[in-house]
Amino acid sequence: MPIRLMGSIHALAAVLVFSSVLHAQTPEQSGAAKALTQAPTVDLSGVWEANMPGMQWAEYSFAPDIPPMTPWGKQRYLAAKPSYGPRAVDHSTDYVNPTTGKDVGCLPPGVPRIYIQPFLFEIVQTPGRVVELFEFDHHMRQIFTDGRQHPKDPDLTWMGDSIGRYQGDTLVVDTIGLNDKTWIDRGGLPHSDQLHVIERIRRPSSDALEINITIDDPKAYAKTWSGNRNFKLRPTWNIKEFICADNADYNEEFINKSGAYSSPNPSKQHAKPAKPNK
Amino acid sequence: MKNKLLPLLGVAFGLLMGSGPLFAHHGKGAFDMENLTIVKGTVTKFEFINPHALIYVDVMGDKGNVEHWIAESSSNNHLSRGGYDKNSLKPGDQVMVTGHRAKNGAHGLELQCKECLVADSQNKVLLGYYF
């Protein structure tokens, strides 16, 4: 029966295609890697909100001081036009949140800057993988804890290639393979494609998360440096929708039309408010 | 009517609302973060959006002219966690807006500070700051 034969051929084709897809999706999962898969030794799961009270520098960076740079790094730093930090300008060309009035931005913050975007993130743990879900533009990271190694010559990406291992109460995350289109932070600290980020993630108490971040980039910095980022648990909150590309309405209405970002007009400068009446 | 005096009421409201981290979506360099400005007027539109909620207020100027002010609060995601929603402000509401004005004199206000808020004529907070 021709029709039944065609059906069988379709079914066979589907099986062949499906099995090849399955195979293509798990090239790194060798038998050795599976054997090394670690079950989580510490529960880091939850929705986390930045908790850096009284630390103004935490609005834009991981540490209060500017780390010593190489000449290459300094040149990149001076070329950046950030919205925050010691070198903040009104008309920022920040690749994430520009205030030029014409650029959309919305490129991924990258690692580790994604932790400084002022939105929540969630950690989801499975035996072979830790997933970080970021509210800001729905970015996500996969940290493989199945024993695999980094690719020998990784493609350079915005979020890099991350592998992790549990050491007692700490998840140690090692990330390479980052492109050099991003900044380390929101203040314009540079990095090269040689950037190597090491995160030590702990939960010092049930409602607190601490991430120690080491920046190793000999092309951009004179020496490795590190900083801390603390978070508090938000047990009743969920990650909400945030679509950066949908910022266009806001940019048009507030950045452009409000006039707040246009060049100063001395005749319109408002006087300083008078002292309050007593 | 604009009130350029330091808004003591606003500060009091801010203290009542509690504190939060000083994080914002973009830089504040274009705004006078040293001083607070109050404007009183009528809400014409309220957009509860990301990355910042927008409040449009028509203000009667000193010479009887209508000034169109626009104020930005924090993200609707953050504001919703503080108990505010798309119905917190409605067109026609008579409000007092406390915030940081654009340095260049434009009718723009930045409402991302602990003292920043939108209140009604009875000084009830309709939209506070919430990270």
Image (cartoon, rainbow, N blue to C red):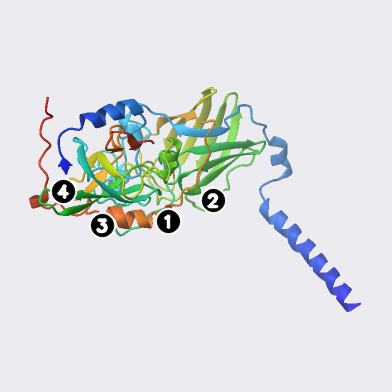
Residue nearest the viewer, comparing B94 with A248: B94
Residue nearest the viewer, comparing B15 with A76: B15
Q: Position of residue A80 (x, y in %)?
A: 29, 48
What residue is shown with label 2? Answer: A154
Host chain of mark 1: A
Please state which amino acid type lies under the numbered disc 4.
Gly
Mark 3–mark 1 Cα distance, whole angstroms, equals 18 Å
Mark 1–mark 4 Cα distance, whole angstroms, equals 29 Å
Residue nearest the viewer, comparing A125 with A26: A125
Q: N-terminal of the two: label 2 or label 3?
A: 2
Mark 2–mark 1 Cα distance, whole angstroms, equals 28 Å
In front: mark 3 or mark 1? 3
Kindly check if marks 2 and 3 are in contact, taking CB atoms under 8 A apart as contact: no
In front: mark 2 or mark 1? 1
Residue B105: which disc? 4
What residue is shown with label 1? Answer: A245
A240 displayed left or right of B30 = right
Mark 4–mark 2 Cα distance, whole angstroms, equals 51 Å
